[in-house]
Image: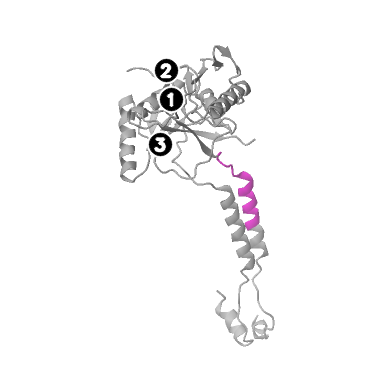
Amino acid sequence: MASRNKAPVEENPTLDMSSLIDVSFLLLIYFLVTSTLDPKEADLGMTMPTSQGGASDVEIEQMTVEVNNVGHIVVNDEVLDTDPESREVPLLLDRLQTYAESARLTDSKPLVIIAADDGAKGQRFIDVLNALADENVGINNVTISGFTEE
Amino acid sequence: MPSAKLRAAHEATGEDLQMDMSSMIDLVFLLLIFFMVSSHLIIVQIDKRVDPPTAANAKVAENARGRVVVNVLADGSIWAQDEVELPTTAAITDYVEQGKLINESDGLETRLHLRADQDVDTRVIKRVVQAAGEAGVVDVIFGSYVVEN
């Protein structure tokens, strides 16, 4: 022991970091694999028309979209999309595109009334709003009918 | 920090004892990038009891200024952002009015941020929108999950 201490040290003593890095990478991979990300929450907007609303001079007939208590979407007494489990509403989207296009051609402000049954689920109501926010429709002037009087 | 013995041994050689930090820095950068990628900004305080609907055309918000948040649970109960229940329509209107007054003092336009559960009846959604309308708030934002297509 004593003789070893007396020996002259010629090499640079270095700290071996490789095992530390191994452990750190293992931890990193563990957290990468086990972590779950919360889904992003986003905005779906609508603006209720007001008495001071800046409507254009030319008026277009408003469109009423009904959502019944079983989740069927009805326009002009015609049942369009009937699967409440599907997030796609192609027939409604088609109608809305036609309506938005005619509003654009006549330079008027489209207005959609959503008449949702009290028992309709929130998701189905959002499906209609989602169709209104579609890039080919782009109607945010929306009102809801069927408010209850208290 | 090298021990006194190590230092004493190396004083004779005249070299500095240094720890190689480059790999450590690599690792720290990796962690930083991981958390930067995986995290997202909290726009509003999230009530975990609400399971919002999904909407493909919803837009991720950039700021939360001027929002009055109302949470609607699947059982139809209505809660303010700070987890205080709003049992009556008048309570909702009061809550929205208070938020509107605060926003007006800051020069902001008030919007109702409605976080309604996907299974809640539309009756409750209409009730909240109506109450907000009575408080003079007509801009409504529905909180929803973005669907990745």
Q: Badge 1: how crowded within 10 Å, few (<14), some, or many (20+)?
A: many
Q: Which residue is mark 1?
A: B125
Q: Which residue is mark 2?
A: A146
Q: What range of the chain is rendered magenta?
A: A24-39
In the image, is residue A28 part of the stretch drawn in magenta? Answer: yes
Per the image, label 3 sits on a secondary structure element best described as strand
Residue occupying image coordinates x 33% and y 25%? B89
Tell me: A130 left or right of A8: left
Q: Is residue A26 above or below residue A5?
A: above
Q: CA distance from mark 2 to mark 3?
A: 22 Å
Q: Earlier in the sequence, mark 1 or mark 3?
A: 3
Q: Tag 1, which chain?
A: B
Amino acid tagged 1:
Ile
Amino acid tagged 3:
Arg
Q: Badge 2: how crowded within 10 Å, few (<14), some, or many (20+)?
A: few
**Quadrant occupied by the N terminus of chain B:** bottom right
Magenta: predominant secondary structure element? helix
In the image, is residue B116 part of the stretch drawn in magenta? Answer: no
Q: Which residue is mark 3?
A: B111
Residue A78: x percent and y percent?
Answer: 58, 12
Do marks 1 and 3 share a chain? yes
Per the image, label 1 sits on a secondary structure element best described as helix
Q: Nearer the viewer, residue B131 or A31?
A: B131
Per the image, label 2 sits on a secondary structure element best described as loop
Residue B99: x percent and y percent?
Answer: 33, 38
Tell me: A111 left or right of A23: left
The mark tally for this picture is: 3
Tell me: A108 left or right of B134: right
Q: Nearer the viewer, residue A83 or A29?
A: A83
Amino acid tagged 2:
Gly
- Is disc 2 in contact with disc 3, using a CB cutoff of under 8 Å? no
